[in-house]
Image (spheres, coloured by chain):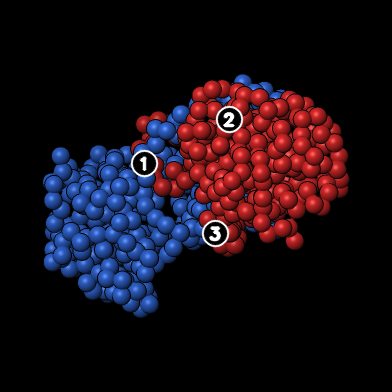
Chain colours: A red, B blue
Amino acid sequence: MPHRTFTTNKTAIIGTGLLGGSLGLAIRGICPDAEVVGVNRSEAGRRAARRAGCVTATSSSIATAVAGADLVVLATPVGAFETIFHSLVGKLAEGALVTDVGSTKRDVVRLGESILGRGGPFVGSHPMAGKERKGAAFAEADLLVGAPCLLTPTSHTPKALLNRAKTLWQAVGMRPMEFPPAEHDRVVARISHLPHIISSLLMALPRDEDLPASSSGFRDMTRLAGGDPEMWRDIMLTNRDAILNTIDRFDTQLAKLRTVIEAGQPKPIEQFLAKEQQRRRTLPDG
Amino acid sequence: MPHRTFTTNKTAIIGTGLLGGSLGLAIRGICPDAEVVGVNRSEAGRRAARRAGCVTATSSSIATAVAGADLVVLATPVGAFETIFHSLVGKLAEGALVTDVGSTKRDVVRLGESILGRGGPFVGSHPMAGKERKGAAFAEADLLVGAPCLLTPTSHTPKALLNRAKTLWQAVGMRPMEFPPAEHDRVVARISHLPHIISSLLMALPRDEDLPASSSGFRDMTRLAGGDPEMWRDIMLTNRDAILNTIDRFDTQLAKLRTVIEAGQPKPIEQFLAKEQQRRRTLPDG
């Protein structure tokens, strides 16, 4: 079991957008005396994080922010991670935990271990939380509460480091689960990445003039399409193989269903719908 | 413009499930002195409608229920409509409006006009409202408020009859829109029927043991999969052509996107996502 209580004297959050900002708010809530330093390249981004109370201070320098920090969280788009890992080399405090909030893990964990070292200090994390607004101004500590956080330790990850990461996510209200990095990417392709792609594709189907005829079902099915195009572009590029594989699985199932609809076969249509209706009932509540 | 106020002395609702029951509640709210008779084949269904206050009386006989009624609403699964239309012949009061809540319209309007007559009394309606629970026990007048109601008049439909139907749906809080029947079926295949199919297909992708890793995005995208399998089976059978056509359009778009993901092309991926993000913002609010 991880420690029940998470503590930090100084945390550095690199990237103070919606997720980084929300985590900052949550950490400030549980560790009110901690320094929480937010790193952002833009002055506007730093100001927004300070105004929203997500951090106790901001910096444009990763080296300054991580000096003496016992926790470092990468919360930029995944495409920036390699550069950030390199800039952490030789700058981290002894025993610091480095983790992230990125949506893909195979490449990220490979980079984290090869640049920062096997056996620590990096443990991959993927908090399954978000909303269709960007930036610290929309951050809220409750964004994380009740959602799963997928951790991706490897055979090199020290138990104590993994436990500290688990304790962090539990302390901010999340449900930690563990997956090997490649398995994580396959799972999230099915439960997150393909659903996002599909949401945008459904949005593309109706003509503009027919959109006012749509109702709550269409609104739900296209909510994800409102997400940040740059972030999702990065996800599609970094989790390409698992996403392509999932598209093909999905397409095979769609073709099967198309066949029974075309043949006008009531039984297999109803059986398919009834089976997934039952499975839907086993989903964890919101 | 339709009349501003809808009135009825006696309404017959044939089928007292979620939608029929909700409409009954709404009509009782705006016409508190009206008789609202619910027809259901099963005693349990009639009892549920009475208990929920959806109707003032129930009957197992369509002839009894529609005698003297100025409004008759078909609210059973679409598959039962042909039989019901036949049982209305010679039983309707002079000037009565007959409408429905069915999700497909080309076949329904053809049957309604050929069995009950061109030039009235039938006008097709499709209130775009629902939820993932069946039966009068879950009925609520507010289910209809703010949602579109798609009306499908033909060149034979008298203006006065169409106006009365519009007034009804406006009076219960809906936004009436008009489509020719076949066009309605094409539009709802895109904004409702394919999204439902996709929701069930997405539910089928993850393994059972991976479902706890899912979060709010997956929950939204699979909400429709929780819908009634029999009702949706009927919809897929009666709107088959438009649904097959929509599946093919969707599949073409999916294949295009797959190609740019496979090629690792950031620009077209981002452009596609950004375009649909913008269109999503034009959707009417919930």
Distance, label 2 to label 1, CA atoms, is 37 Å
Q: Secondary structure at mark 3?
A: loop
What is the x, y in percent for residue A205?
49, 34
What is the x, y in percent for residue A64?
68, 28
Hey, what amino acid is under mark 2? Thr
In the rendered image, residues at marks 2 and 3 fall on the same chain: yes
Q: Secondary structure at mark 2?
A: strand
Q: Chain of mark 3?
A: A
Residues B27 and A113: in front is A113
Q: Residue at x 75, y 53 (%)?
A: A163
Residue corresponding to mark 3: A285
Whether tag 2 and tag 3 are in contact, CB under 8 A, the answer is no
Residue A58: numbered disc: 2
Q: Secondary structure at mark 1?
A: loop
Whether tag 1 and tag 3 are in contact, CB under 8 A, the answer is no
Q: Nearer the viewer, mark 2 or mark 3?
A: 2
Hey, what amino acid is under mark 3? Asp
In the rendered image, residues at marks 1 and 3 fall on the same chain: no
Whether tag 2 and tag 1 are in contact, CB under 8 A, the answer is no
Q: Residue at x 30, y 75 (%)?
A: B51
In terms of sequence position, does the residue under pointer 2 or pointer 3 come before the other?
2
Neighbours of disc 1 within 10 Å: few (<14), some (14-19), many (20+)? few
Residues A257 and B16: in front is B16
Q: Nearer the viewer, mark 2 or mark 1?
A: 2
What is the x, y in percent for residue A178?
74, 52
Furthest-front residue in view? A33
Residue corresponding to mark 1: B285
Asked if A40 appears above or below A259 in the picture, the reply is: above
